[in-house]
Amino acid sequence: MIVEKTKKHRVPIEDTYTYLRVGSKHQGTYIDKSQIIYIKACESYAWLYLKDGSKILSSKTIGFYEQLFCDDNFSRIHRSYLINLSHVKQYEPRYRLMYLHGEHVLPVSHRKNRVIAKMTRTQETNMPFKMAV
């Protein structure tokens, strides 16, 4: 069992599959994976943008997070962006733009545009977001 330290007491974290540890060995925080809207690459670092409007710098690369979240609801839409599909509001294939909750608009690469457009056509009823026409 993992225990997260807070100022007043320790909070036990039962399910390590829903939480992500970000930070150093001795000073780190646990983040619920569902709170991550998207991850942005910045050279050999990554910025994690959270649902509450904050962002956290990580010393891991975006490729590390892509492999870590391969079974979760995350998708790489660009060389620099890894998004949480549960936070997508709308996808515009004509302009290759992905609209996320919290007024975030991210570009989709040319190569990923076909994959995402095909994914929305085949699973239109099961997708958590809608496709713009």
Image (cartoon, helix red, strand yellow):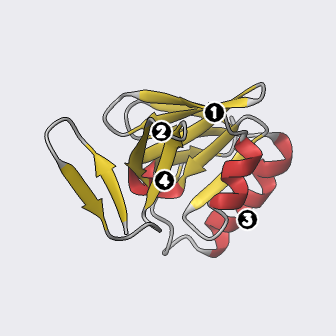
Marks 4, 3: nearer the viewer: 4
Q: Earlier in the sequence, mark 4 or mark 3?
A: 4
- Residue 78 appears in the picture as rendered: yes
* Residue 106 in the image, given as x and y percentages of width and height: 60, 33
Q: Nearer the viewer, mark 2 or mark 3?
A: 2
Q: Quadrant of residue 123?
A: bottom right
Q: Amino acid at mark 4?
A: Leu
Near mark 2 (Cα within 10 A), the count class, few <14, some 14-19 or many ≥20, is: few
Quarter of the picture containing the N terminus is bottom left
Which numbered mark, 1 or 4, is in the foreground of this view? 4
Q: Position of residue 120 (x, y in %)?
A: 62, 64
Amino acid tagged 2 = His
Q: Which residue is mark 1?
A: 40
Q: Residue furthest left?
A: 8
Q: Residue at x 33, y 57 (%)?
A: 3
Which residue: 58% across, 47% down?
A: 83
Viewer can see residue 133:
no
Where's residue 52, x and y in %? 31, 35
Looking at the image, is mark 4 or mark 2 earlier in the sequence? 4
Query: Disc number at residue 26?
Result: 2
Q: Which mark is residue 132?
A: none
In the image, which is nearer the foreground, mark 3 or mark 1?
Answer: 1
Q: Give the CA separation, mark 1 to mark 2.
A: 25 Å
Q: Which residue is mark 4?
A: 20
- Dot 4 surroundings within 10 Å: few (below 14), some, or many (20 or more)? some
Against 45, is 12 above or below?
below
Looking at this view, is 49 or 111 the one in front? 49
Q: Secondary structure at mark 1?
A: strand
